[in-house]
């Protein structure tokens, strides 16, 4: 149980294009999902907290107009990187918190984004 | 100010050579300290959650302990498959704050 999937697992795009990453909780409902970014040999940095049916809460320094988050259902959240640039290349990981829990998080396998 | 500090950054062990990883934290009113394992190119895999000083949890060759200011992850008689980055995180302000991790390499 408690499986989280991400799609795609990797994506390469040209500078200036937009990329959408999906995060799904497969066997549980998640009122809250989190989006992280991880640069090589660094730890996970929280980008934003996404609550189903409401606007995401972004961490300081994260551009909300660049990283659009939509949490339209209890099992799906999407992150869209708009007008991507090479500096946006990173490993993006989502996690989902089961509705029944207040602090458990289950992580997806991550999405490797490379912007050329 | 960093809320979670892990040490050492890297640890190279011989198979069977037990060791410990440290995670120190500065948040007050801890509502959960988490240990995760992360393999290269993968998302973190949950290992343990600890809530109060004195608490211990075990899973196979891993044992996590918690004091008021730090947590230890003990690896007993490690095997090469225990090679990974081990991440510590604290639940604070309704979110997880991660340490930088300890990369463990176990040689056969």
Image (spheres, rainbow, N blue to C red):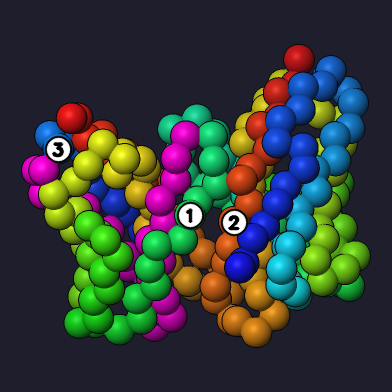
Quick check: B46 above or below A47? Answer: below
Residue in the image at 50% along x and 51% along y: B44
User: Which residue is nearer to you in this view: A51 or A109?
Assistant: A109
In the picture, measured across the screen, residue B78 lies left or right of residue A76, that is left
Q: In this figure, which residue is indicated by the disc labeled 3?
A: B15
Packing grade of label 3 (10 A; few <14, some 14-19, many >=20) is some
Chain letter of disc 2? A
Residue in the image at 35% along x and 49% along y: B86
In the picture, measured across the screen, residue B14 lies left or right of residue B57, that is left
Furthest residue to the top? A116
Earlier-in-chain disc, 1 versus 3: 3
Q: Is residue B67 magenta?
A: no
Packing grade of label 2 (10 A; few <14, some 14-19, many >=20) is many
Q: Secondary structure at mark 2?
A: strand
Q: In this figure, which residue is indicated by the disc labeled 1?
A: B45
In the picture, measured across the screen, residue A33 lies left or right of residue B86, that is right
Give the quarter of the image for residue B48. Answer: bottom left
Chain letter of disc 1? B
Q: Nearer the viewer, mark 2 or mark 3?
A: 3
First to last magenta residue range: B16-40
- As measured in the structure, the alpha-carbon distance from the residue carrying label 2 to the one carrying label 3 is 29 Å
Q: Secondary structure at mark 1?
A: strand
Give the quarter of the image for residue B64. Answer: bottom left
Residue in the image at 80% along x and 48% along y: A22
Residue in the image at 42% along x and 76% along y: B32
Q: Position of residue B72 (x, y in %)?
A: 21, 62
The C terminus of chain A lies in quadrant: top right
- As measured in the structure, the alpha-carbon distance from the residue carrying label 1 to the one carrying label 2 is 7 Å
Q: In this figure, which residue is indicated by the disc labeled 2?
A: A107
Quick check: B94 above or below A44? Answer: below
In the picture, measured across the screen, residue B51 lies left or right of residue B10, that is right
């Amino acid at each position: 149980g408690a499986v989280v999937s991400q799609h795609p697992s990797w994506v390469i795009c040209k500078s200036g294009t937009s990329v959408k990453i999906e995060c799904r909780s497969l066997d549980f409902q998640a009122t809250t999902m989190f989006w992280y970014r991880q640069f090589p040999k660094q730890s996970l940095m929280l980008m934003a907290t996404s609550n189903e049916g409401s606007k995401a809460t972004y961490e300081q320094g994260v551009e909300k107009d660049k990283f659009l988050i939509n949490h339209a259902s209890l099992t799906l959240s999407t992150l869209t990187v708009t007008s991507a640039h090479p500096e946006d290349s990173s490993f993006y990981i989502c996690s989902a918190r089961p509705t029944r829990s207040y602090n458990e998080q289950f992580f997806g396998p991550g999405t490797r984004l490379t912007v050329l | 100010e960093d809320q979670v500090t892990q040490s050492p950054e890297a640890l190279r062990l011989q198979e069977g050579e037990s060791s410990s990883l440290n995670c120190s934290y500065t948040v007050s009113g801890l509502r959960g300290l988490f240990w995760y394992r992360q393999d290269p190119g993968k998302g973190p895999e949950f290992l343990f959650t600890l809530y109060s000083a004195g608490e211990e949890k075990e899973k196979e060759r891993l044992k996590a302990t918690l004091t008021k200011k730090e947590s230890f992850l003990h690896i007993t008689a490690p095997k090469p498959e225990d090679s990974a980055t081990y991440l510590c995180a604290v639940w604070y302000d309704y979110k997880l704050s991660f340490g930088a991790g300890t990369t463990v390499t176990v040689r056969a």
